[in-house]
Amino acid sequence: MTKGLFITLEGGEGGGKSTQSRKLKEYLEQKGREVVLTREPGGTPEAEKIRALFMDSNGTWSPVAECMLLFAARAMHVRDCIKPALDAGKIVICDRFTDSTRAYQGYAGGMDKAVLEQLKTIAIGDFEPDITFILDLPANIGLGRAAGRLAKSGGVQDRLEGKALAFHEALRQGFLDIAAKNPSRCRVIDATQSIDQVFQDICKHI
């Protein structure tokens, strides 16, 4: 294999993206593939610094400012992590990518989608994943799961998790609209199922 494969997992809060990303990495490594598991925002030292700013619960960034932060981080992530791994023939699995920016800052945040795409082109050109899994579930269920996870871990709710239910419902519809507009790339997975059932659905497409 001379070309790698770029897989992204998307969706609202509590959908299980991180869990499924780890399971998929283990599965593909058992098949003898080299796999890079990464996340957004983040994935490089520079991008992780931006992540800390972006996720701070005290932040008051506007959707436009958020978008510029995210694409600054993404430009470094693509250049220094994702593309080198793909060029080496590896499989890259990323927990969130550009579709999250489209959904959070565009559909739910109200940013002009044309401006968002212009920023995307400036930052990373026409670069997109080979396949995207959108883990879909009702917003109230996802937020309940996220709250339960924080209660168990003793973590702190981030700025996006704390937004109103209406925001998260708009977010869900945004992801579903992205999937409908990109049927050759996106697969919608029912994330209300058990962890194992969700993983089986992902593996059918992989």
Image (spheres, rainbow, N blue to C red):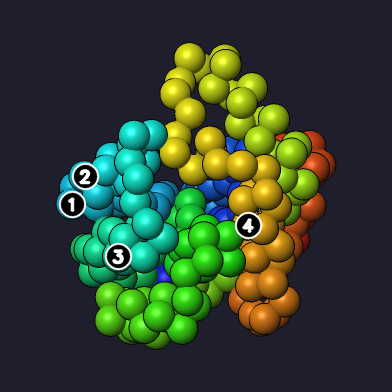
Q: Earlier in the sequence, mark 1 or mark 3?
A: 1
State yes or no: discs 3 and 4 in contact (Cβ < 8 Å). no
Judged from the image, the secondary structure of the residue bearing numbered disc 3 is helix
Q: Which residue is mark 1?
A: 46
Q: Which residue is mark 2?
A: 49
Q: Earlier in the sequence, mark 4 or mark 2?
A: 2
**Around disc 2, counting alpha carbons within 10 Å, would you say few (fewer than 14), some (14 to 19), or many (20 or more)?**
some
Residue 198 vs residue 120, the one in the foreground: 120
Q: For this view, does 123 lie left or right of residue 109?
A: left
**Is mark 2 in CB contact (under 8 Å) with mark 1?**
yes
Quarter of image, res 120: bottom left
Residue contact between numbered discs 1 and 4, judged by CB atoms under 8 Å: no
Q: Which mark is residue 123?
A: none
Query: Identity of the amino acid at label 3?
Result: Met
Q: Report the disc number at residue 171.
A: 4
13 or 112: nearer the viewer: 112
Amino acid carrying label 1: it is: Glu
Q: Secondary structure at mark 2?
A: helix
For marks 3 and 4, the one nearer the N-term is 3
Distance in Å between CA atoms under marks 3 and 4: 19 Å
Q: Which mark is residue 68?
A: 3
In the rendered image, residue 36, in percent from the top left (x then y), is placed at 38, 53
